[in-house]
Amino acid sequence: MTLRLTPYLVMDGNAKEAIQFYEKALDAKVLYIQTFGEMPENPEFPIPADAKKRVAHAMLKVGETDLMFSDTFPGQPHQSGNQVTICISTNDMERSKQIYESLQQDGQVNMPLQETFFSPAYGIVTDKFGVTFQIYTEGQN
């Protein structure tokens, strides 16, 4: 089993600009970038036109460290200064469930742990100290 913690920066529509900035400022290398418009379409929840160019997920390599990015979906709250979350990645679904359950104690569920098109178990929780974690399970769903 692997377990990895990665800083995750959530931007408000300017993730592409931030990625370009960090490429130059930190000599970062873009490993992956996908917009909301490039994601599989769900007919029940069509993607609004103003969301299609926003970054759904990106990963940069800065030295030996991964740095993840996304934009908020239009209408989601965003407060500058509080946009850093921590992504906890594991390849063990039971471990993901355990971490998720532990972190939500006296905290707040932002997104229930669930299967998504990119993960067999993914969820977002803010712990009782106000720290937001994204729990990401690697592997096929």
Image (tube, rainbow, N blue to C red):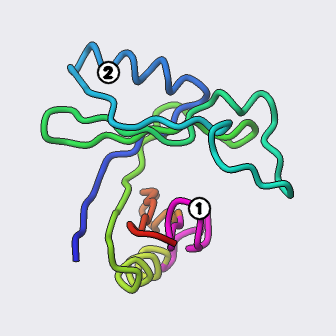
Along the line of sight, the residue nearer the viewer: 81 or 47:
47
Name the outermost residue toward the left: 64
Please indicate whether residue 37 sits to the left or right of residue 105 in the image: right
| SS assignment at label 1 | loop
Identify the residue position indicated by label 1 in the image: 117
Residue drawn at x 27%, y 57% is: 5
* Residue where numbered disc 2 is placed: 22
Spot occupied by residue 100 in the image (x, y as percentages of width and height): 45, 76
15 w.r.t. 48: above or below: above
Q: Amino acid at mark 1?
A: Phe
Q: Quadrant of the N terminus?
A: bottom left
Residue 59: percent from left, percent from top: 37, 39
Q: Looking at the picture, how far across and down is residue 125, in whole percent? A: 51, 65
Q: CA distance from mark 2 to mark 1?
A: 28 Å
Which of disc 1 and disc 2 is earlier in sequence? Answer: 2
Q: Is residue 78 visible?
A: no
Span colored in magenta: 105-123
Answer whether residue 8 is visible to the viewer in this image.
yes
Query: Which residue occupies the foreground of this view, 114 or 109?
Result: 114
- The amino acid type, in three-letter code, at marker 2 is Tyr
Q: Position of residue 110 (x, y in %)?
A: 61, 62
Q: Is residue 107 magenta?
A: yes
Is residue 16 located in the magenta-colored stretch of the structure? no
Q: Is residue 139 left or right of residue 39?
A: left
